Amino acid sequence: MFSKPLAGVIAKFFYPRSLSGRLRFASCLLLPMILGITALILEQAFSQSLEAATKERLRLQTYVLLGAAEAGGGELWMPSALQEPRFSQPGSDLYGLVSDADGRLLWRSPSTLGSDLNFSLRLKNVDKPQFGRNSEGLFYFSYPVVWETEDGRETPFLFTSMEVPTSYEAELGSFRVHLWGGLSLLALLLLLAQGLILRWGLNPLMNMAEDLKAIEQGESDKLQGRYPKEVAPITANLNLLLEGERRQRERYRNTLADLAHSLKTPLAVIRNIANGYDCQEVDKDVNKELADCRRPRQSIAEQIDRMDQIISHQLGRATATPAHNLLKPIAIKPAAERIGHALEKIYRETFQSFAVIGPDLAFKGDERDLMEILGNLIDNAFKYGGGEVKVILAETEADLIIRVEDNGAGVSADLHQAIMQRGMRADSQQQGQGIGLSVVRDILAGYEGKLDLNSSAMGGAAFRLRLPK
């Protein structure tokens, strides 16, 4: 129906994309409508008040006619001069009329001379006072009376005063000019004031856009303006997101650097082993040959395991996400139960029982972080415990608390802090590189959480996580 450019202009006009444009469009649409309705109501009220004043004035003039009239023998006499001089002035805007029951005009004032108005029309069958405008636009007030003569006969008469609506229309026109002119000026002033108010009210959003542009151009690293309380939560969360993104970039850079540095030694060992042994050369004893071949293979396998652990640890740190209130809450109990049931199969030889106890709590963070934390702690509980593991959930006013307990031999008090360090292990008999708890602590640091180690009521170790809500 419309060409694309015209349709775009129409859509832009009726559906502005900016908030200020929408508010201005709504103001320009609603304000004239409201003021127009107000003007019509005021004009109607003023018109009714003018009509009421005209009715009262004509009623008094009709009483003047009635007071000056005399009747007798079925006839009516009116004096040549009335109290209201306009009745006696030809061409004035006030007319006096008297008619009988049949609507025949019995008397009319000298002011009607030279007028071609049909005064008797519309004056029939009047049995009570009436006020209105006739077909020719004149205001009239009619008052019926019944005159009793000397012989007892009753003669009906209808006294009517008419007025040309000159003063009425002049006053109404003057009122309309002042009303619509004043409201139009008021509308312009209101639109101007509203524009200034909108600019002042939306100024924080404009400042936010400028701050974001400065961040995009690298001139700033966060939103630094002072914002009202309605906008402050948004800016605070944006700053958290920006800070988290900045930390994430730094974490990736540091992780890649750490990963590259950590892999240098294992790679050098593998290279030296590969260069130092050749299983194809057999000089003496076959057993010695096999031993020499197995030895480098075992060393290579150990170094590969170490490399795998290093990569897992560093990538775990790189993907740790800072906590903030915009993340979707993750139910803790189902996640812990899923991990525990999976580990039951791995440790089926020593498994006794697994339970998750406590209320249904939610973790506001990345689900992968929660799975990494719970996976490491529950795996340690099964690995170093006696086969019985409990995950206990609780909360305080400000924190979430997760306890992972086992029934193993526990950890001596002098090792509580040591095993939290990277590469440290309390039990050297089990497989592992001693970095699981370090990964947990690194992830918790991004959420401002803490990890403590205590003794369990079951006799083993009890790891307690405390996370802010």
Image (spheres, rainbow, N blue to C red):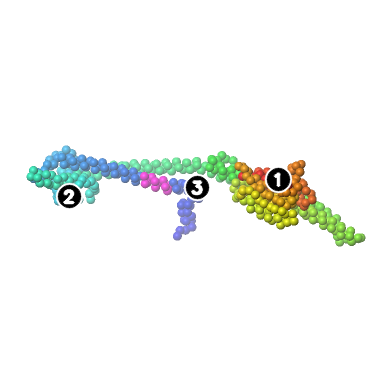
Query: How many numbered marks appear?
Result: 3
Q: What type is the residue that disc 1 sits on?
A: Ala
Q: Quadrant of the N terminus?
A: bottom left
Q: How many angstroms separate mark 1 from mark 3 (CA)?
A: 60 Å
Pointer 3 with pointer 2, Cβ within 8 A: no
Q: Relative to the observer, which residue lies in front, 10 or 314? A: 314
Kindly identify the residue that appears in the image at 45 percent across and 58 percent down: 2
Pointer 1 with pointer 3, Cβ within 8 A: no
Residue position marked by numbered label 1 in the rendering = 457
Callout 1 crowding tier (Cα within 10 Å): few <14, some 14–19, many ≥20? few
Q: Relative to the observer, which residue lies in front, 196 or 239? A: 239
Counting from the top left corner in percent of width and height, residue 56 is at 23, 41
Residue position marked by numbered label 2 in the rendering = 120
Q: How many angstroms separate mark 2 from mark 1 (CA)?
A: 115 Å
Q: Which range is magenta?
A: 28-38
- As helix, strand or loop, the secondary structure at mark 3 comes to helix
Q: Earlier in the sequence, mark 3 or mark 2?
A: 3
Q: Earlier in the sequence, mark 1 or mark 3?
A: 3
Q: What type is the residue that disc 2 sits on?
A: Ser
Residue position marked by numbered label 3 in the rendering = 19
Kindly identify the residue that appears in the image at 60 percent across and 46 percent down: 325
